[in-house]
Image (cartoon, rainbow, N blue to C red):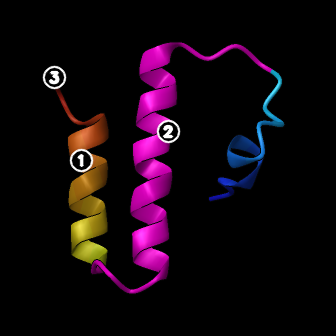
Amino acid sequence: MQCKPIKEKKLKRHQSRQTRATQGRLCAAWDRYGKKEISTSELLNECCRLYGPV
């Protein structure tokens, strides 16, 4: 997943506050996973929390 355009503010389309917040948390989880701070199962659990049923 590419999170760079969002960090560089090159994203041109409108996003709701909720979508931006979710995207930010997802990018943060990917960053932690990339740095080996969390395991694959922890990354998947974070995704479940973000996109699971309300």
Q: Which residues are magenta?
A: 13-39
First in sequence: mark 2 or mark 1?
2
Report which residue position mark 3 lands on. Answer: 54
Q: How many marks?
A: 3
Q: Is residue 26 magenta?
A: yes
* Kind of residue at badge 1: Cys
Residue under the point 22% across and 36% down: 52
Proximity of marks 2 and 1: CB atoms separated by less than 8 Å: no
Report which residue position mark 1 lands on. Answer: 48
Report which residue position mark 2 lands on. Answer: 23
Which residue is farthest front? 8
Residue 53 position, x and y percent, is 17, 28
* Kind of residue at badge 2: Gln
* Kind of residue at badge 3: Val
Q: Secondary structure at mark 3?
A: loop
Q: Is residue 31 above or below residue 24?
A: below
**In this view, the mark in front (2 or 1):** 2
Residue under the point 32% across and 81% down: 37
Quadrant showing the N terminus: bottom right
